[in-house]
Amino acid sequence: MFSGKVKPDYRVPGLAYRRENGELKGRLYTTLPKRFKTAGWQAYLTAFYVFAGLWAALWLLGMSGALWKAVQFGLLLGLLSYPVFVVYDPGLRLRINSSELKIGRRRYTLKDVSSFYKIDERDEDQHIIGHHVGFRYGEKEIEIPVINNRKVIEGIVPFLNREREAIQSECRIAKQAPASPEPAAKARVVEF
């Protein structure tokens, strides 16, 4: 009888992460069916920022037709960046350590963060069009703005809850453990 060793799969779709001592670093990203929508939004933002920056630069340099050139270049870059954003989603940075939860640029005290849970996103007709990860921070409900399908979010939520609890318990154990044992009396060297 032959048997093979099966390696466990530690990948979590929608989350690229690296676990270190007492810290989880990673990025939440949109998986592919929903990425077509988010790629459009990212391409739009890219086109807008390029348009605004180029228009301001050309206007300060005193070039004629600065507005029209900036509009053309912004639209061109927006159209070219859409397929790039469909293939590559930069994601939203996530970091959990002993004292804080950092999502993008926002920081939260970890002891005030509740468990993570799934939030449904609905359209104007109240049909579910996607799901987000959310948590409570004091009285507020914080929604992480990364949209995915139900299966992906149901994989991310328990993983984030387990990691948050593991990091908190590691920190408690580290605080309870003595810093270092007292140095024992020096052993005598015996020569034969």
Image (cartoon, rainbow, N blue to C red):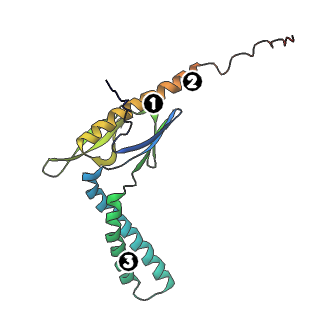
Image coordinates for residue 165, horizontal then vertical, percent:
42, 28
Label ID, residue 174: 2
Residue pictured at 38% horizontal, 35% vertical: 160
C-beta proximity under 8 Å, tags 3 and 1? no
At numbered mark 3, what does the secondary structure look like: helix, strand or loop? helix
Task: Tell me the quarter of the picture where residue 90 sits.
Answer: bottom left
Q: Earlier in the sequence, mark 3 or mark 1?
A: 3
Point out residue 104 in the picture as x, y percentages from the top left corner: 43, 49
| Label drawn at residue 73 | 3
Quadrant housing residue 110: top left
- 107 or 41, which lies in front? 41
Identify the secondary structure beneath mark 1.
helix
Whether residue 22 sits left or right of residue 43 in the image: it is right
Relative depth, front residue between 141 and 43: 43
Q: CA distance from mark 3 to mark 1?
A: 47 Å
Where's the C terminus, which quadrant? Answer: top right
Of mark 3 and mark 2, the one earlier in the sequence is: 3
The amino acid marked with disc number 3 is Phe
Task: Estimate the x, y position of residue 75 in percent, counting from the top left.
Answer: 33, 74
Task: Tell which residue pokes out farthest to the front in this image.
Answer: 1
